[in-house]
Amino acid sequence: MKKTVIPALLVAAMSAAALLGACSSRGGTSENTVPASTTEGEVNTSAVATGDSDSGSGEEIVVTIWETQWGTENYEDTLKKLAEEATAAHIDGKNIRVEVQCIPWDNYYETFMTAYTTGTNPDIACQASTAPAQYNDLGVALDLSPITDAWKNENPDFYNEIGETAILFEQDAEGKQIGLPFAIDGTGMIYNKDVFESVGITQIPTNYEELTEAAKKISAAGVTPFAFRADHCSLNNFLVFSNGGYNIGLDYEILLDDEKVIRMLDLMKSWWDNGYVAEGTAGYSADDIRKMLINGDVGMIISNIPTWASAEQRAKLGIMPVPVGPDATEETKHNSMSYQAYYAYNTSDHPDETLAVLKWWYENNDILYTEGGNSTVPLRASQFNSVFGDDEVLQSFFHEYVDNNGCQTTFVYPFEHFETWYGVFDGNKVNTKALMNIFTGKDYRLGLKESIAETKEIFEAYGVGQ
C-alpha cells in the first residue's frame, strides 16, 4: 500500500478531536490514492453474502480485523474464537481466513494512524466513533452500501432494527456508507429509588417543573438533589435537546444563545443558586457521580446506561423518561445519542471479500457480548435482549432513551450526517463553557460569548456557514 503524508494541520485537528475526550468527535481532510481494483462503483455487490456451507476452494484470501478492547480480559480470546468461526464458515464459498487483533485503548489513536500512514492498516476496523469519518476524510474508507443494500432488500426487519437514523449518521454528505453502526451511546436521567422513597416522591418527574419540586424535597431532607459531569458535551445536549433545541441549525446558524438554550441555562443557574447541584460538579468525572448516586449522596444524575453498576446496585436505581423542557412538547423533546461503528479501508487487496466478511461479522458477533464482555450497548433491540435479558433497569433505559419512538436523535441533530467541522466543535467541548461558568460562580453569558466566537472560528476554518 502507498505510504501517505498527512498535513500537519489535519493531524492536529484529528488529534484534538480524538484525544480531548469528545462525545463523538471527528476531523480532517485529505486525499489518498485508491487502487483501481477498489475504485468506488467497482465493488462486486454479490460479495456481501452469508456463510456458505460448501468448503472454500481456491487460493487462500486473508482478511484482517482490528478491534479495540471493548470488553473483559476474555475479549481478545473471544475475538479469536469468532475469527475461527468466520474462517470455518467459508464465507461466499471462498477460502477466506479471518485474522484479528485486539488493540489496547492506550495509544489506540496513534496505533491506527501509524498503521494507515505506513500502509499496514487492517481491512476492517472498530475503534472510536470518530474513526469512520476521519478515515473517509483521508480518502480511504470503503463504501459499505452493498451491505446495507443487501440488508434492506433481503432482510428488511434486520435493516429496520438498525434504523435509518443510525444508518444515515454513518454516511457522508454524498450518501456514501462509511460505517456500520452496531452500538449506541448516550445519557439519561437516573435516580436513586431509596432517596426518592425516603422523601415521599412517588410520581416520577416528567418535566423540569416537576424535577425542581423533587429537588426541593430532596434538598429539604439534607441530600443533594443533583450531581453532573460538567466538562462533557452530553450535559448541555441533554438539557437543550430536551427543550426542543439544538446547537447548530441546518443553515449553520449558531444557536448556542437561542432562547431555548437560555431558558435551560437560567434553570440550571437557579438550581445551582439554591444548592440543588453538588458543589464539586465542575470537576466530577463520570465515575464520581455514579458512586455518589449508588451511595445515596445525591438523588439524580445524568449518565450512560448503568451497566457500570452491579445487578445489586442497579436494584437501587430507576430511569426517568426524557423530561419535557419548558419550551418543548412530547413531540419536540429529544435526547442525544452517538454510535459505535465498524468501517473498512478501500486500500484492501480484497474489497469484495472484505465486504462479505464484515457483513458476516456484524451478523454473528453476539459472543463478543456474551463471552467477551463487550461493554457497549447493542443498537439492535433483539441483540440487546439476548445480551441483557430481563434486567429491568437496563431495559427501562433502552426503552426510554434508545427505542423511544422518535425521541432519540444524534448529537449532531438536526443534521442527518456527520460533518467534519462538528468533530472539532465537539472535541473542543465548545458548548460546555456556559455551564462550567455557572458551576464556577462566573457569568454564563461570558461563556456563551466564548463558545460563539470559537464556533465562528471553526466555521471559517472549514469553510461552512459563509
Image (tube, rainbow, N blue to C red):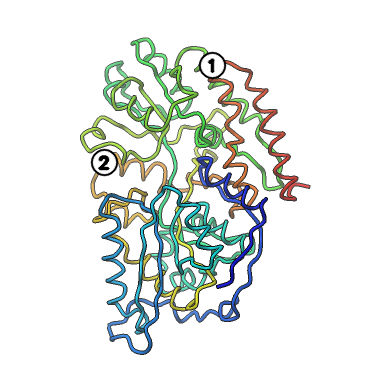
Disc 2 element: helix
Q: Is residue 9 left or right of residue 167?
A: right
Q: Earlier in the sequence, mark 2 or mark 1?
A: 1
Number of the label disc, if any, that sits on residue 466: none
Residue 386 in view: no
Compared with residue 16, is residue 142 higher up or lower down, i.e. above or below?
below
Residue drawn at x 54%, y 65% is 118
Residue placed at 60% from the left, 29% from the top? 433
- Quadrant assignment for the N terminus: bottom right
Quadrant housing residue 206:
top left
Q: Position of residue 368 (x, y in %)?
A: 30, 58
The answer for how far apart the CA atoms under marks 2 and 1 are is: 34 Å
Q: In the drawing, what numbered circle is on residue 392?
A: 2
Compared to 52, does 432 lie above or below? Answer: above
Residues 403 and 81: in front is: 81
Query: Could you tell me if residue 147 is visible in this image?
Result: yes
Residue pointed to by mark 1: 270
Of the residues shown, which amino acid type is indicated by label 1?
Ser
Look at label 2 and name its amino acid.
Answer: Glu
Q: Quadrant of residue 103?
A: bottom left
Give the image location of residue 92, x and y in percent: 37, 81
Image side of residue 200 versus residue 455, left or right? left
Q: How many marks?
A: 2
Residue 60 position within the rendered picture, expressed as x and y whole percent measured from the top left: 37, 83
At label 1, counting other C-alpha atoms closer than 10 Å, the crowd grade (few under 14, some 14-19, many 20 or more) is some
